[in-house]
Image: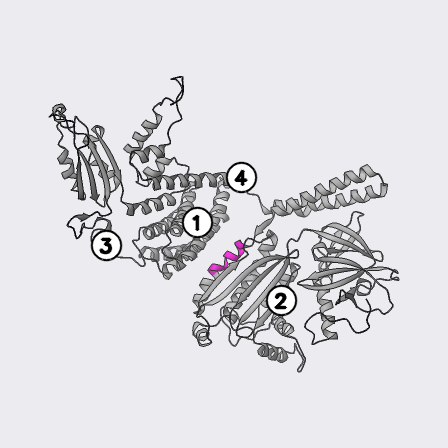
Amino acid sequence: MDEITSVFVTESREQLAALESALLQLEDNPDDSDTLNAIFRSAHTIKGGAGVIECDYIVAFTHVVENVLDKLRNREITLDSDLIALLLACGDHMGHLLGVLVSGANGPDEDLAAEGEALLKRLQRDPGTAESPSGPPAAIAPPIESSGGSAVETDCWHISLRFGPDVLRNGMDPLSFLRYLSTIGRIERLETMADAMPNADEMDPESCYLGFEISFSSTADKAAIERVFDFVRDECTLNILPPHSRLTDYIALISALPEDTMRLGEILVKVGALTQGELDSGLAEQSAPQPAEDAPDEATVAEPQPLGEILVEHKAVQPELVEAAVAKQKQVTEKKAAEARLIRIQADKLDCLIDHLVGELVIAGASVSLLAGKTGLGELIEATSLTGRLVESIRDAALQLRMVQIGETFNRFHRVVRDTSREMGKEVELVISGGETELDKSMVEKIGDPLMHLVRNAMDHGLELPSVREANGKAARGRLELTACHDSGSIVIEVADDGAGLNRDRILAKAVERGIVQPGQALTDTEVFNLIFEPGFSTAEKVTNISGRGVGMDVVRRNIQGLRGSVDVSSEPGKGSRFAIRLPLTLAIIDGFLVGVGNAAYVIPLDSVVECIELAVDGSGRDYVNLRGEVLPLVRLRQLFAISGEAPARQNVVVVQYAGVKSGIVVDQLMGEFQTVIKPLGSIFRNIRGIGGSTILGSGEVALILDVQALVKRCANNEAQLIPTSSGPRALPTGAQP
């Protein structure tokens, strides 16, 4: 039972996420019946699952929500933003009830129960109730007379009726059935069919040869119309086709059916497009043995005709309904097949597999390769090379297991943007792109809070009120963008708005006031904008529920840096701001490039490496080289880390790139590619710049992993100090040699 409950909670949380997303879509497009049906199915699925595990308090609450959604589907109540907000609150409450179930409590506490009662009372007031039409529906309106005097046929039920020859002998009056038919609707058009009438000399006065084609307008369902002819059902041929206006309703009902395995006939009967009698008749004909046309042996029978074709031939249903039912069957079958291929496992087990087992396997494989190289045995080296490739494939496959699309995180902000914009009286459009970009699950979980801060700050500080935007010649509705993409082995997530932008002068004045910047100090725009990440820094004139206390942006940067990432900001007055977060794809295992300086080994993330060149020693000690006409700033690891000893006569430069900026790392020797298992450094090393972690080599020695981001920024800062006004790559000084 615990396992069933765990599965129910997991699936219900997925259904609640789908319900919330669909409600937000419905607010923008209230007439979308497919979305409304999807919302109803989510609530229905949760209620059904709660009934299976006998969780009465979830069943009771969800049942009322389901009733309101059913009224929405039947257009008994109208949809507005207040009802959407109420249904979203109900979804939140259902999530809280799931939390109660997980905790093992017998039911919600007093506060949660009171919250649920308040929501139920609001739901049961039928918000937005629409008056039901008192007159007949448009589908059964009186016929319209044409200019020629004949009636224009309306959209009615079509009844094709052929009485059997023995109806009169059995004491039945065919006209009495037509009169009784008029009690549940109105015959708009009737045509007597004499196609079964024999010649006069062959006519039997006791036999019935009558047939009728009837256009019948009624609000009754198909089963009720069929019951009119119950007494002669076995002695007549009866086909009933619904009005074309009902086809859409039937198709919508088919789409809204629960995701259960059903046969085609069951689906059509379930929605009322087919009666049980018509289904039985069709099944009987399908099961009747039929000899094959070209078979010499009479015992050989042909394949049974599909039921859908039989029903269409008998004019029991329209082809469109059969197609919709077949599509529903296919949808259910594919979903069941997809679910059968899906295995749910705990994240802890994946972490153990990747961080420990696969990581240690990579280290052990490197050790074996090193020992094999020392032996010089060709066969052994070849075998270990093959093993290394297999280990690399296992590593990549294991990492792929933990990759998830960031769109799941992005979609949560639809609700945040909706609620926050309503609270602030602003109109905001959220645009998401790149949601299919994949990222390590551990990274996705940790990036949620920084993104939340950036989104809320963009809405509070960036986007203006509608009146202000219109006065500035902008659309009243602001635009907030969330985008994600891959770039050079990293993922870049951007939060952008088209608001007022950052006020450079106000930020600088606040920084001077707080002593962060000295008066008269010259700063670039990027340096000024980065001041907003200082602890406690805020330019807000008043504190709101959203922001203004100077808490958050410093936490954003600290959390992102904790993920070995960076955040940059750019802004243009009157046009908006853009925050770009750059993160590594994974925190566990990477491809590295091993280099040596003195007796120490260092690892550079391979995705950051552009090329390697030899450094010519000219005795000048310059911290730049000529790279095909552009200046490449250098960082010398021997000097940076104060490594003792003399540098060799020949040194190398590893050209790296981060966020489009190139720098060179001067090393003694190049040692090739290396699968790197990232081991975090202890807290005592947290303030060391230029080091992002450590790894274990095949020899058992420890190698430090270089923080390319920090090294590139160090070079960029040195460049800025040399030539503060430069805005691009510096030209090589006159007379300088590479």
State which region is magenta: 407-415
Task: Tell me the kind of residue under disc 2.
Answer: Asp
Residue found 59% across the figure and 47% down from its top? 347
Looking at the image, which residue is at 84% across and 38% down? 377
Quarter holding residue 391: top right
Give the answer, above or below, for where 64 lies relative to 425: above
Residue occupying image coordinates x 47% and y 44%: 8
Question: Label 2: which residue?
Answer: 568
Three-letter code for the amino acid on which mark 4 is drawn: Arg
The percent coordinates of residue 191 (x first, y second) are 17, 39
Please tell me whether mark 3 sits on a helix, a strand or a loop: loop
Q: Is residue 157 in sight in this rendering?
A: yes
Amino acid type, residue under disc 1 in the picture: Gly
Q: Earlier in the sequence, mark 1 or mark 3?
A: 1
Q: Nearer the viewer, residue 318 or 722?
A: 318
Spatial CA distance of label 2 from label 1 is: 47 Å
* Residue 436 screen position, x and y as percent: 55, 53
Find numbered disc 2 in the image and state the secondary structure of the residue it sits on: strand
Residue 86 position within the rendered picture, expressed as x and y whole percent measured from the top left: 38, 58
Single out the mark in the foreground, 4 or 1. Answer: 4
Report if the CB atoms under discs 4 and 1 are less than 8 Å apart. no
Disc number at residue 107? 1
Q: Residue sitting at 46 percent across and 59 percent down? A: 415
Q: Which residue is mark 3?
A: 133
How far is the residue under mark 2 from the one under mark 3?
Answer: 59 Å
- SS at circle 4: helix
At mark 1, the secondary structure is: loop
- Hey, which residue is sitting farthest left in the picture? 205
Q: Which residue is mark 4?
A: 341
Alpha carbons under labels 3 and 4: distance apart: 49 Å
User: Does 231 sit above or below residue 321?
Assistant: above
- Camera-near label (2 vs 1) is 2
